[in-house]
Image (cartoon, rainbow, N blue to C red):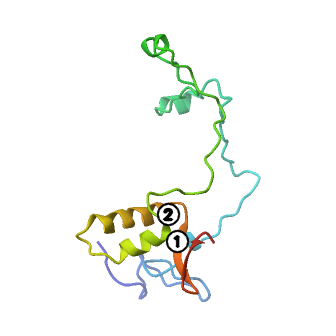
Amino acid sequence: MNDAAPGANNPVYPNPSPGEPVVGAAGIHKEAESVVMTPETPMVKEYGREVDSLPKEVASAGVTIHPTTIPIPQPAASLGVTPGPANIPMPSATVTLPLTDDQIAQGLSKSILTSWRWLAEWCLRRLKQVHIGLQYVKGRLVRVSSKS
């Protein structure tokens, strides 16, 4: 195997022409290469819910269509379980936690050996999951949106 460095009439690593970028470990990366879309370039075809059957090439690869509705089993239906509405409204953006913002701030200053601290940490984590942070503004604790 030829592990020689580029240059010096090396057939594996030929000398680049002037103005040509050096391709290799420190050369052009795949992310920097440009992609030219031509009319011949195949486009990705998106399948939605209205697909009845998959092409045989896709099915042979192991892709299956999952049903959009799930039937209720007979034992559950005999107990009176019915399917819910198709459009369930999302809950409002308000977050109700077991602690108030002031209690969270007090709990964060406690020792890590107390359950009060861990409950405050959990509440702060839940706030961060909905992109809300706590911040002192002019001596008052307020909720601040962390979405950009």
Q: Is residue 41 above or below residue 132?
A: above
Under mark 2, the amino acid is: Leu
Q: Is residue 48 above or below residue 103?
A: above
Q: Is residue 30 above or below residue 57?
A: below
Q: Residue furthest right?
A: 39
- Expressed as whole percent of the image width and height from the top left, the position of residue 99 reads 44, 62
Q: Residue furthest left?
A: 113
Q: Is residue 78 above or below residue 52?
A: above
Q: Which residue is mark 2?
A: 127
Q: Nearer the viewer, residue 12 or 111?
A: 111
Q: Is residue 47 left or right of residue 120?
A: right
Mark 1 crowdedness (10 Å alpha carbons): few <14, some 14-19, many ≥20: some
In the image, what residue occupies the spot 33% across and 82% down? 4
In the image, what residue occupies the spot 49% across and 61% down? 129
Q: Which residue is mark 1?
A: 133
In the image, what residue occupies the spot 65% across and 37% down? 47
Under mark 1, the amino acid is: Gly
- Expressed as whole percent of the image width and height from the top left, the position of residue 20 reads 59, 83
Q: Nearer the viewer, residue 146 or 68?
A: 146
Mark 2 crowdedness (10 Å alpha carbons): few <14, some 14-19, many ≥20: some
In the image, what residue occupies the spot 49% across and 84% down? 15
Q: Is residue 126 left or right of residue 82?
A: left
Q: Nearer the viewer, residue 12 or 40?
A: 40
Which numbered circle lies on residue 54? none
- Expressed as whole percent of the image width and height from the top left, the position of residue 148 reads 63, 72
Q: Is residue 114 left or right of residue 133?
A: left
Q: Are marks 2 and 1 in contact (CB under 8 Å)?
A: yes
Distance from disc 2 to disc 1, alpha carbons, whole Å, reads 6 Å
